[in-house]
Amino acid sequence: MVRYGIAMGVRVACVIACFFAQGWWLLAFVIGAVLLPYIAVVIANVGYKEGGVVERPASMLPVPYRSAGARDE
């Protein structure tokens, strides 16, 4: 959340700077305002855990099939 908030804060600064910039600076601020939301979402969605255990789908047991009319006796 912190990294996302920082990136969106920089985006707001780029949008505000677009009103005051001229020339190549205007282009740089527009590019920053357009690309930063994508970059912020990608950064926010990257999860990093140290020592995390990866569970494989193959290690799960299948549930046996039962027909609708079958009874447990």
Image: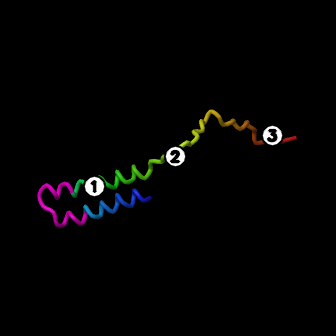
Between 70 and 59, the one lying in front of the other is 59
Label 1: which residue? 34
Between 62 and 60, the one lying in front of the other is 60
- The Cα–Cα distance between marks 3 and 2, rounded to whole angstroms, is 45 Å
* 59 displayed left or right of 33: right
- The Cα–Cα distance between marks 3 and 1, rounded to whole angstroms, is 59 Å
Residue 19 in picture, x, y percent from top left? 19, 66
- Which stretch did the figure color magenta? 15-28
* 73 displayed left or right of 22: right
Closer to the N terminus: mark 3 or mark 1? 1
- Give the residue at the far top of this rendering: 58
Is 2 contained in the magenta span? Answer: no
Instruction: Name which residue type carries label 3.
Output: Ala
Assign a secondary structure to mark 3. loop
**Based on the displayed image, in which of its 4 quarters is residue 54 positioned?**
top right
Assign a secondary structure to mark 1. helix
Is 24 contained in the magenta span? Answer: yes
Instruction: Name which residue type carries label 1.
Output: Val
- The Cα–Cα distance between marks 1 and 2, rounded to whole angstroms, is 30 Å
Label 3: which residue? 70
Q: Are marks 3 and 2 in contact (CB under 8 Å)?
A: no
Residue 49: image tag: 2
Instruction: Give the quarter of the figure containing the C terminus.
Output: top right
